[in-house]
Image (cartoon, rainbow, N blue to C red):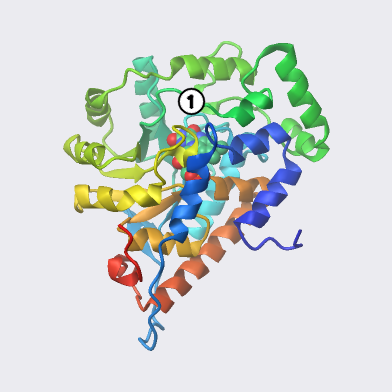
Amino acid sequence: MPKIPAAVEDFRELARQRLPRFLFDYIDGGATEEQTLKANEEAWKQVHPRQRVLRNVEDTSTNTTLLGESCSLPVVCAPVGLAGMMATRGEVQGIKAANQVQVPFTLSTVGICTLEEVNSAATTPCWFQLYMIRDRERIEKLLQKAWNSGSRTLVFTVDLPLPGMRHRDTRNGLEATGFAGALVKASQIISRPGWIYRVALKGQPLTFGNLSDAVPNGKDLDAFKAWVDSQFDPSVTWEDIAWIRERWQGKLILKGILDAEDAQKTVEVGADGIVVSNHGGRQLDGVHASAEQLPSIVKAVNGRLTVLVDGGIRNGVDVFRALALGADGVMVGRPWIYAVAAKGEAGLVQLLESWQKEFRLAMMLAGVTRVEDIGREHLAELKN
Ligand SMILES: Cc1cc2nc3c(=O)[nH]c(=O)nc-3n(C[C@H](O)[C@H](O)[C@H](O)COP(=O)(O)O)c2cc1C
């Protein structure tokens, strides 16, 4: 193991060493046979930048604007549930790092820290991710809470009518309440005394921050999980998106679009952006990698809204590949949470800064100096 982590795989390995197994697997795993999880990473590798030389690329900038927000590179930290279980107040460390590098940070509905805690630690407020919950009054309250705490971009996730079948979680007792589950988790926790100190003791309160008033037994994560599972609403339709649109005056992004016909509809309901996503391979195993679906979706929306993509982006060259295929920016899930679990805020700053360098290098060697100018002509082979 290298002393100084340089790339995502180094942070991943450090996270594996520091976290109880059930938490590492919760981050690292995917649905069913994890076919889509693997395909997501592999598909980017089939996209080849076109190397061009002698084009005066001295004045190359990675700056851009995403949904009206200035960014130092076209990367957004994706919503990751339970981030505060991976490091001391994980969401706060995450947004501080993201603010420092100047990229947007998204807080999950099922984050540990509240909107208020995260936004009061921030120089630029978070984007807030929402799942549809059966109790519509609670949704209205959450929208209000997000707005009042300063958030102006809502990321509404549409690919989770039910959580996917994640077998690693079942094996580790994450799905089970009662004695058997507790025993498995306890045995894994005992082997990570550093985590007990950093998170279980120093990282309190470990509740689902934004939902903590919803469940009577606010400190019991198992009870919370049962509540959240029963509250996810699989009856959601496009009409509910219209309902959300009426109640949210900020930017609205729909996350979890993987089909060109659905993408077409997102334009009709007045979304400002989409995230082309299969939830990082955590939902329906076997669906195409996001990279494979991106070109047809870009074509369908035809510049009418902002297109972000996530799933398997692991370095600055992958960011370049995504933009060359037509995305305006990318979201990253596992990379940021591995970095925070491994080395906290400083780890995420280091990772994002190294991606920025790598992305800039890719731009320079492809002969393009402005983010907005990256396109298909910067790819050597067009597979789609
Ligand atoms: C541990 C973990 C928790 C996640 N929790 C959420 C969540 O609460 N809400 C959501 O919309 N997506 C969630 N996602 C999906 C991510 O936002 C994102 O779509 C996915 O991680 C992208 O793939 P990548 O991890 O390969 O970058 C989660 C992903 C991971 C790995």
Residue at 58% from the left image edge and 31% from the top image edge: 112
Residue 353 lies left or right of residue 144; in this view the side is: right
Q: Is mark 1 within 8 Å of ligand 1?
A: no
Expressed as whole percent of the image width and height from the top left, the position of residue 220 reads 64, 17
Looking at the picture, tell me which residue is in the foreground, 92 or 362: 362
Displayed quadrant of residue 90 = top right
Residue at 75% from the left image edge and 62% from the top image edge: 2
Q: Quadrant of the image for the N terminus?
A: bottom right
Displayed quadrant of residue 152 = top left
* Residue 337 in the image: above or below residue 56: above
Residue 289 appears in view? yes
Looking at the picture, tell me which residue is in the foreground, 147 or 35: 35
In the rendered structure, which amino acid carries the disc numbered 1?
Answer: Pro
Q: Provide the residue designation for mark 1.
A: 163
Residue at 44% from the left image edge and 22% from the top image edge: 162
Expressed as whole percent of the image width and height from the top left, the position of residue 326 reads 30, 58
Expressed as whole percent of the image width and height from the top left, the position of residue 306 reads 28, 50
Residue 88 lies left or right of residue 143; in this view the side is: right
Looking at the picture, tell me which residue is in the foreground, 232 or 39: 39
Extreme-left residue of the structure? 268
Residue 257 lies left or right of residue 283; in this view the side is: left
Expressed as whole percent of the image width and height from the top left, the position of residue 173 reads 68, 22
- Tag 1 secondary structure: loop
* Residue 247 in the image: above or below residue 39: above
Crowd band around label 1 with a 10 angstrom C-alpha radius: few (<14), some (14–19), many (20+): few
Residue 250 lies left or right of residue 84; in this view the side is: left
Residue 107 appears in view? no
